[in-house]
Image: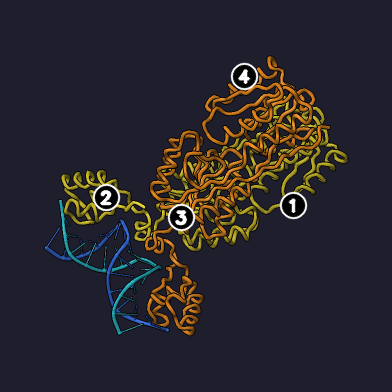
Chain colours: A yellow, B orange, C cyan, D blue
Amino acid sequence: MVKKVSLKDIAQKIGVSTALVSYVLSGNEEKGRVGKATAEKIRQAAKELNYQPNHIAKSLKTGKTNTVGLIVADISNPFFASIARGVEDETSHYGLTTIIGSSDESTEKLKNLVDVFIKRQVDGFIISPPDNSEETIEYIISLGIPICLIDRHFDHVDSSYVVTDNKSSMTKAVSHLLDLGYKNLAFVAYNSSLQHMKDREQGFLDASSKVNSKVYKINFSKQQLELNGALDEILNSQKADAIVFATNTLSVDGLKYLTQKGIQIPKDLNVMCFDFSEVYDFFYHPIIHVKQPIEQLAKESVIALTQQIKDNTIHKKVLNSELMAKSRE
Amino acid sequence: MVKKVSLKDIAQKIGVSTALVSYVLSGNEEKGRVGKATAEKIRQAAKELNYQPNHIAKSLKTGKTNTVGLIVADISNPFFASIARGVEDETSHYGLTTIIGSSDESTEKLKNLVDVFIKRQVDGFIISPPDNSEETIEYIISLGIPICLIDRHFDHVDSSYVVTDNKSSMTKAVSHLLDLGYKNLAFVAYNSSLQHMKDREQGFLDASSKVNSKVYKINFSKQQLELNGALDEILNSQKADAIVFATNTLSVDGLKYLTQKGIQIPKDLNVMCFDFSEVYDFFYHPIIHVKQPIEQLAKESVIALTQQIKDNTIHKKVLNSELMAKSRE
DNA sequence: CTGAAAGCGCTTACAG
DNA sequence: CTGAAAGCGCTTACAG
């Protein structure tokens, strides 16, 4: 390992104190009121010696690590993979590094990750919380560590968050189905106390009040089984003419099952999906879906978090989604 | 922010030196030859005060950050997303934290990420290098920083690596197509100097020598256009009876185009894909594909890297893949 | 405008 | 078996 050059090396080389070097190189030149000429010499020497500041030492002194901890609910879900990518991109613009974890929808795993990240002394968290994890979120807040929730939030927890307007997105989507003439709707969602899930359901209910409709709730832990069961019921007893899927995963798995059953979309039955998926491209007819502003969610969450880190303010942001729907035929 | 308790707090509480506390709490009790009773008291106090060691201070002193930098070639590719997840899981078992970056197949971006990660003082790298990035890899080696390449390696660069046996995987896969009776094969790969790509091509050539075959090379930067062009040629002039795709992305995008064209698989044409994809589930007939041992690649790379960090040894590991092929009908 | 110095929280020879 | 002390590389009041 090549020996690293330190502030001291630079200071010695030009015969000034490390204090001056520190001021100049960390951009606090005016604060130290360093002389023009000296500052120039210091910068010159730093370049010559190829000085690389030691972040560790800086962190120890300042208590800031310039690291943010991102914990998504399920990294194997392309939606969250995109979120992760967006957050990473955005933080890098602020000179921050992101460390990523996945709670896999488990409160227990979230707790562990939070502990690990706190030990790593992250400057703040961006979290997409799993069901029933208010306590852990409140724990972070009680420690005074900045946090911004993303995609999901708790109505009764006072934290920064950036989410999509789930209720209105769903209302808009369902209204579109009604406009197309569908009259017997099935809504497939998770059984969850998370606000975004409740909002999507409410949005569905609000829009579908004038037609026949039924809500199916799947337990996350038994997804495969219960989803297929619900779809069987939708096909055989409810005989719905359109299915609204409340999430990305439900959409893809639902489409998979429908395809296996030989159902033609939209001929036999239409669907309204949530979030984009690559698999839509394998259908001859475009799959209608709600497109959340993933990039923007990620970006805004980083903005909210960095703001909070700076001045301890809380930011709540609700973004609009886009309905991706070509005409029925 | 709650005030953190430090070694000193513990030392004061029971009236010993911080040295003793450090020895005991970092598990070097025998090295410091600390008395049984004292050690017990220290552990007790640490628990009572809920002591959390400060990693930053430790890192500054020891020069180790317990962080590994993972740079995949394209995080939006599910193959690499799985690799990332595997690496993260595995490193966490060693008390290491992973920071992730994506070079997006760009040498330039790789260089930047490497610089950022070196500044962060990662203890080692796990990298899936893009085309023409030997220099950057050799630069890391020249700095004496441990590194393990994953999925891809350079024959003439002496580094640790963990890869799949690409040549034999492809030979086995193509032989299977021959067994099924296909006689006119198309091989669709990237134009790349990366060893794994050359190996896959060689594997194809070795196995297909006795039948009609043609190789198509796509430039990564113009993938969409060139892939569709190649497929048109395969369908219209070569009139191949089976297509072998050399990578994950080519497989999915290729299938997408074939589906759009209304090609029925395997009736009109069969395909051999590389890596698993969720989209395969949307075909009525199982898609034949080579399944790389992703979990194991990730795991072995972490093992190789931690070994190298410990004793500076280089490990080269080649894993076998699995051919996922149900009978033709 | 500049320097001497303390201190962030650890680890680790060294002396006893 | 235990303590005093140096030092990792920075930042930042403080004094001049």
Front label number (1 vs 3): 3
Visible in this render: residue A262?
A: yes
Residue A322 vs residue A251, the one in the foreground: A251
Residue found 65% across the figure and 26% down from its top: B187
Residue A281 vs residue B178, the one in the foreground: B178
Residue found 51% across the figure and 31% down from its top: B193
Give the residue number, with chain letter if any, for mark 4.
B229
Q: How crowded is mark 1: few (under 14 residues within 10 Å), some or many (20 or more)?
A: some
Q: Give the residue type that dot 4 points to.
A: Gly
State which chain disc 2 sits on: A
Side of A74 relative to B285 (left or right): left
Front label number (4 vs 2): 4
Labels 4 and 2 within one chain: no
Q: Give the residue type that dot 3 points to.
A: Asn
Dot 4 lies on which element?
helix
Residue B312 bears which disc, if any?
A: 3
Dot 3 lies on which element?
loop
Residue A28 bears which disc, if any?
A: 2
Side of A247 relative to A149 (left or right): right
Q: Give the residue type that dot 1 points to.
A: Asn
Give the residue number, with chain letter if any, for mark 1.
A219
Side of A102 relative to B48 (left or right): right
Q: Do the residues labelled 4 and 1 touch (CB within 8 Å)?
A: no
Quadrant assignment for the C terminus of chain B: top right
Residue extending furthest top? B237
- Residue A134: x percent and y percent? 60, 59
Q: Give the residue type that dot 2 points to.
A: Asn
Query: Could you say which quadrant of the image residue A188 lies in?
Result: top right
